[in-house]
Amino acid sequence: MASCCGADSAEREYAEGTSLHGLGKIVGARHGGARLAWSLLFLTMFGVAAWQITERFVAYFQFDTVTNMKVEFRDVLDYSPCDSQFVAYFQFDTVTNMKVEFRDVLDFPTVTICNFNRYRFSKITAQELQYVSTLLEGSTGFNDYDYDSDYEDSDQYNFDWNSTGIPDGFNLAEFTLRAGFDMDVSLMGCTWRGQSCSKDNFTLVFTSFGICWVFNEGGTLNQTIAGVGNGLRVAINIQQDEYTENALAGNLDAGIRFVVHSPSEPPTVDTQGISVGPGTHAYASISKIQYTNEVPPWGKCEPGRTLGYYSGYSKTGCLLECRAGHVADACGCRTVSMPGTLDYCQPSVVTGCVKTTMGEASLLHRLLEGSFT
């Protein structure tokens, strides 16, 4: 009886004649080293194939549902099938695919909460009370993110700072930290997924609203169950008796303003925030939308672009850093809500140099966007 895999065995004949790649190379190898190499390669590829087939079977029997919606943007809807495919290829047409996925776990976004009142009355001295209205008036209409704001007419922001009583060396950042929105005394209740939370779960951040507080700044939390009781719930005392805002200088509203955003994106409280008045409550239902932009020649996305002060790239962060760069070059300082390491600008510089520079940046942006009229 012939031994297995001998010169005349059926196994060897099968291995040499089969279309299953690899077996013939193993059997026909003249050297032990070559046979070993082919054996390792065959077993590796066989293992990968088995793993992929198993994954497909497991995924199939999970019965997941995915809704695919395809939106095509074409200049001409009807075309002849005889048109040159070669020419069509170099037109770099784009197709937008929208995919709806239902996931068991989602990353919980960042929530930034601000008070319409920037400075608390009880934390302001009698001397500071004389010029707090000037500080509020100086920041009226001052938006770090809105390039459409009208900053060109800088004369409306000019003040006689010698008559305001603001001392030399006045530090707006220190004043805001002392008199600004304090979550330690305003937070009346807080729960996250049914568990208690406190001020320690919030991070202070400067915005055009003064001091705001950020929940889940690092983006480490996730959500597994939908519903009102499984997200973030807060009860805040706005301390309306502490308000120093007035109709002529400052905000007309009372209450809080919050915005839900990505952890890698700075909060756009002015443009995207939701306002909640005193004595009321609001629910914010959210869904995650993720965009993947195409690189040239199909799109304008530049892969690998990063920002200096934010963990991820976003248009909001890019515009804010761009503005901070313009202000730093022209004025040698930054506002309290701008990223960077420079000293904070004095109030006179904010209403003079800073707002003039912002007006020039706004005009340049509109020219580049083609929306200048």
Image (cartoon, grey):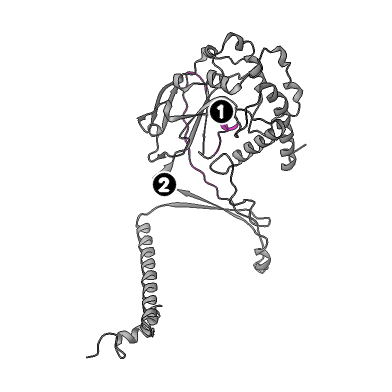
Q: Is residue 370 left or right of residue 195?
A: right
Q: Which mark, residue 268?
A: none
Q: In this rendering, is residue 65 above or below 237?
A: below
Q: Which residue is mark 2?
A: 103
Q: Position of residue 350 (x, y in %)?
A: 68, 25
For the C terminus, give its image quadrant: top right
Q: Tell me the quarter of the picture where residue 222 sits.
A: top left
Element type at mark 1:
strand
Q: In this rendering, is residue 63 above or below 145?
A: below
Q: Nearer the viewer, residue 171 or 186?
A: 171
Element type at mark 2:
loop
Judge the density around disc 1: few (<14), some (14-19), many (≥20) Cα neighbours within 10 Å.
many
Q: Is residue 99 left or right of residue 139?
A: left
Give the residue displayed 66% in from the left and 68% down from the top: 86
Q: Position of residue 107 (x, y in %)?
A: 44, 42
Q: How many marks?
A: 2
Query: In the rendered structure, which amino acid carries the disc numbered 2?
Result: Arg
- What secondary structure do most residues of the magenta stretch adopt? loop
Q: Kindly give the residue lying farthest to the top in the view shown.
A: 126
Is disc 2 in contact with disc 1, using a CB cutoff of under 8 Å? no
Give the residue displayed 71% in from the left and 39% down from the top: 365
| Mark nearer the N terminus (2 vs 1) | 2
Camera-near label (2 vs 1) is: 1
Q: In this rendering, is residue 125 above or below 36?
A: above
Q: Tell me the quarter of the picture where residue 84 sits.
A: bottom right
Query: In the rendered structure, which amino acid carries the disc numbered 1?
Result: Phe
Judge the density around disc 2: few (<14), some (14-19), many (≥20) Cα neighbours within 10 Å.
few
Q: Nearer the viewer, residue 181 or 69?
A: 181
Q: Position of residue 10 (x, y in %)?
A: 30, 87
Q: Which residue is mark 1?
A: 206
Q: Kindly give the residue lying farthest to the left in the view shown.
A: 1
Question: Which residues are drawn in magenta?
Answer: 265-292
